[in-house]
Image (cartoon, rainbow, N blue to C red):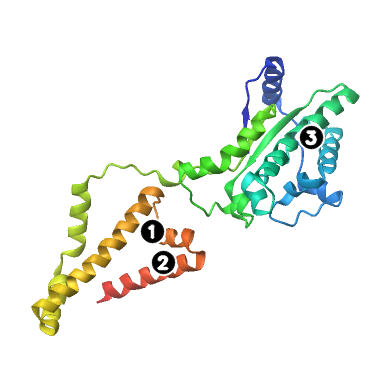
Amino acid sequence: MLFVFIKNEKEVDSMNLITKAKDGIVLDGAMSDELERQGVQTNNKLWTATALTDELDKVYQAHWNYFEAGAELVITDTYQANVQAFIKAGYSQRQAQQFIRSAVKIAKKARDDFEKKSGKHNYVAGTVGSYGAYLADGNEYRGDYNLTEQEYLEFHLPRLRLILAEKPDLIALGGVKMAHRQTHLERKMSTRHIRMISLGGVIGTGLFLSSGYTIHEAGPLGTVLAYLVGGLIVFVVMQCLGELSVAMPYTGSFHVYAKKYIGPSTGFVVAILYWLTWTIALGS
């Protein structure tokens, strides 16, 4: 998890936190363990964020327990809390925004109340979980997803703005995967390069052998019509792939588009069929 310090009006607190972090700082433990110990059911796609909807007192108690155990920095219950997840669970956008802001407020309240009782000043980190955590299928550990940079921003920024509005001491980024880490592509190919690659891919002995058989069977007119129809289909398919490649650059094969927009099983079938096609073509 990456911690980002926030410059705010409490410069002394910020400097103290940076100094303390250099020497080592005690973090809290898992939010899920503390909530489940209090009877919160976290076995759902909202995970610990489900407590933000109607069990905020238990989130407060979880933070308090960690402070009493010696934690100097607690992480807000927003790792799995994002606007999209709450909307998918049936809540309105306004409710989702309220839940996220209340997570930061309750952590700061527990921190301030504990300071009044003990005299010890602790810190609060606003958490931003990965897109994989939102998928709730283990992808936060595998990273088996691919979004454009714009899609990542559209997903993360609403929650980040809400968290920052409540002024935590710092931000904790949990496994946020960015597009530039996946692709490393550079758009330096010109139209001429694309045309030459296309010509090189279709001109070969196979083209002339196949043409001879087609002319013999269908005649000149039938051959021309067949190639026009086939060429139109290929042109449309390649145009679609070109649009997808520009919108979602990816260094792997094109089956990832079928996986993203249709489903994992379709993506798998496309990949296997493409592999099988070229295996047979090379053998022949």
Q: Are marks 3 and 2 in contact (CB under 8 Å)?
A: no
Closer to the observer: label 3 or label 2? 3
Mark 2, residue position: 271
Q: Which mark is residue 106?
A: 3
Work out which residue is located at the far top of the displayed protein and give it: 12
Amino acid marked by disc 3: Ile
Closer to the observer: label 1 or label 3? 3
Amino acid marked by disc 2: Ala
Q: Earlier in the sequence, mark 3 or mark 2?
A: 3
Instruction: Name the residue: 79% across, 33% down.
Output: 71
User: Which quadrant of the figure contains the N terminus?
Assistant: top right
Q: Is residue 192 above or below residue 171?
A: below
Q: Is residue 148 visible?
A: yes
Quarter of the view holding residue 271: bottom left
3D distance between C-alphas at marks 3 and 2: 48 Å
* Residue 165 image offset from top left, x and y in percent: 66, 29
3D distance between C-alphas at marks 1 and 2: 8 Å
Q: Are marks 1 and 2 in contact (CB under 8 Å)?
A: yes
Mark 1, residue position: 253
Amino acid marked by disc 1: Ser
Q: Is residue 209 visible?
A: no
